[in-house]
Amino acid sequence: MSSAIKPRSTKKLSQIIVEQLIEKIQSGEFKVGEKIPTELELIETFEVSRSVIREAITELRSLGFVETRHGIGTFVREQTIEQNFLLSNASLETINDIVSLLELRMSLESEAVFLASERRKQIHIDKMKAALEDFEHHISSDANDGTVKADYDFHIAIAEASENQYFVDFLKYLGEKIIPRARLKSIEQSPENREEYLKAVHHDHVNIYNAIVDQDGLLARQMMRAHLSKSIKKFKQ
């Protein structure tokens, strides 16, 4: 029987497929160790393109529900306690989701930047500066993704400067999801709004960078909290 998807929500097709496949795994329809249907079978079942199915399988794999054995197929993995905290792309669909993630980042990165101010080395400063320059280069560009990556690289460089690997690992686990505009584009509806917003973000980053360079941990923490608070306020509006 066909499971063709006709979404009435704003969810991506791949997200809907992920949710349906997770339901089949959790219900036992797809058992641990068993091979799930092939790409072609899933394409026929859901009546979507190959790229949509591949995106869904990639998401399932990142969430730990399946593993791909090259040349053989994709198999259901056993679920472990360590997989209780999972943040998928499908988990970040609403403004409330984005705001909640920003609040988590505020508590985490405020301490990371404080430690970075105390422990930073020249290699960390160089990485932050390179990310700042990359971000500025893309502000007037049409390539939105350029600023997302540069933004992410800047925050990762700060985490690395803290010399606490857990900060780095956690932010890398979250990935570019930590950058709100990677999920929602409403703040960039016009080139003028986009450029104005990105200039403000860059200004905040420069202030944080300068505080780290000066080894002023209290100011760096204050700047980071102010930076993330602005984002929270913007998305709540």
Image (spheres, grey):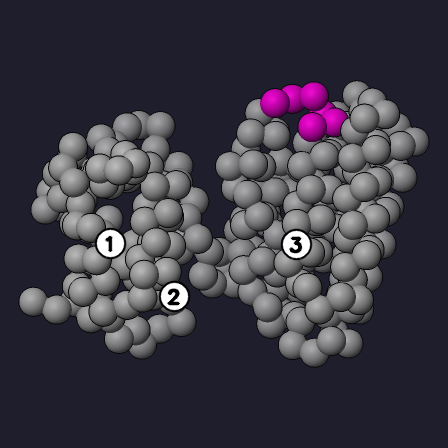
* Alpha carbon distance from label 1 to label 3: 31 Å
Mark 1 vs 3, N-terminal side: 1
Quadrant of image for the C terminus: bottom right
State which mark lies toward you, 1 or 3. Answer: 1
Q: Name the side, left or right, on which 131 lies relative to 43.
A: right
Q: How crowded is mark 2: few (under 14 residues within 10 Å), some or many (20 or more)?
A: some
Amino acid at dot 3: Val
Over which residues does the magenta segment extend?
Answer: 160-165
| Of 12 and 110, the residue lying toward us | 12
Image coordinates of residue 171 in percent, x first then y, are: 58, 37
Magenta includes 153?
no
| SS under mark 3 | helix
Mark 2 vs 1, N-terminal side: 2
Are the residues tagged 1 and 3 within 8 Å (C-beta)? Answer: no
Amino acid at dot 2: Lys
| Of 9 and 220, the residue lying toward us | 9
Q: Mark 1 points at which residue?
A: 39
Q: Can residue 216 be seen in this view?
A: no
Amino acid at dot 1: Glu
Q: Name the residue under label 3.
A: 148
